Amino acid sequence: MKDCVIITSVVQTTNKPLNYSKTRSVYSHQQRFEQTLETIESVRTHIPHAHILLVECSPPSEWMEALREKTDQFLNLEFHELVNHHPEKGLGEKTLMLHALSNLQEEYSSVYKITGRYVLQESFHLSEWEETTGITFCRTDNYGVKDGIHTFFYRIPGPKLPLFRDVLESYNGVGACIENHLVSCLREHITHVEKIGILVRWACYEHAPIL
């Protein structure tokens, strides 16, 4: 079985604030489109055998058609209140991921998730991820819990997809961010790596580190 890479993306964002930032995106729609193309190309380079599934939430446009042509599978919710307007960004993440997971075309050895506009670098080594046995995340202390995780890139082994889907379903955006919800529910199933090798483009900040 081959692998699948899910790219979650919203090229045409609204101006609705998030619960942690008044600015939903510092990048224009054109920039977000071009950055998402970079994401796709980086996946083609560093995970070349993978089936690329991009899940969008933007109106039909030439941008959407260009993204469709660059991917193996293209899904577009076009507009969804939780994705486009809700202040809790984790609910948008949940919505896009569940839609993608519900539309997988076959069984995969692993499913990777990468946030659109983030770019895999030469310091990314796929072999480090293929050797892990659990649901694999990069460790971080950003969220104030022991063994916290980033969700802009992670790996789900095929046999653990039902478990992961159930945990996503249970997230309601109350009391914890999606990162901490996943840690709380999946702790015994998680494997950590200490770095990814990815250019991080947080939507709300112009600072773009490589982690």
Image (cartoon, helix red, strand yellow):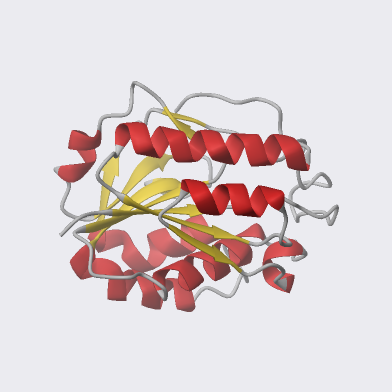
Residue 100 vertical position relative to residue 37 in the rendered view, above or below: below
Disc count in the image?
0
Q: Residue at x 29, y 76 (%)?
A: 162
Which of the two residues, 143 or 45, is positioned nearer the viewer here?
45
Residue 98 vertical position relative to residue 129 in the rendered view, above or below: below
The answer to whether residue 142 is seen in the rendering is yes
User: Residue 120's quadrant in the figure?
Assistant: top left
User: Residue 177's quadrant in the figure?
Assistant: bottom right
Which of the two residues, 44 or 184, is positioned nearer the viewer here?
44
The answer to whether residue 150 is seen in the rendering is no
Q: Is residue 57 left or right of residue 71?
A: right
Pinpoint residue 115: horizontal percent, then vertical percent: 51, 47
Pinpoint residue 183: horizontal percent, then vertical percent: 39, 59
Q: Is residue 10 left or right of residue 13?
A: left
Pinpoint residue 25: horizontal percent, then vertical percent: 75, 42
Which of the two residues, 150 or 6, is positioned nearer the viewer here?
6
User: Residue 206's quadrant in the figure?
Assistant: top right
Pinpoint residue 178: horizontal percent, then vertical percent: 53, 61
Q: Is residue 128 left or right of residue 41?
A: left
Question: Residue placed farthest to the top in the image?
Answer: 122
Q: Residue at x 56, y 61 (%)?
A: 93
Q: Residue at x 53, y 40 (%)?
A: 142
Q: Quadrant of the C terminus?
A: top left
Q: Residue at x 69, y 67 (%)?
A: 78
Q: Quadrant of the N terminus?
A: bottom left
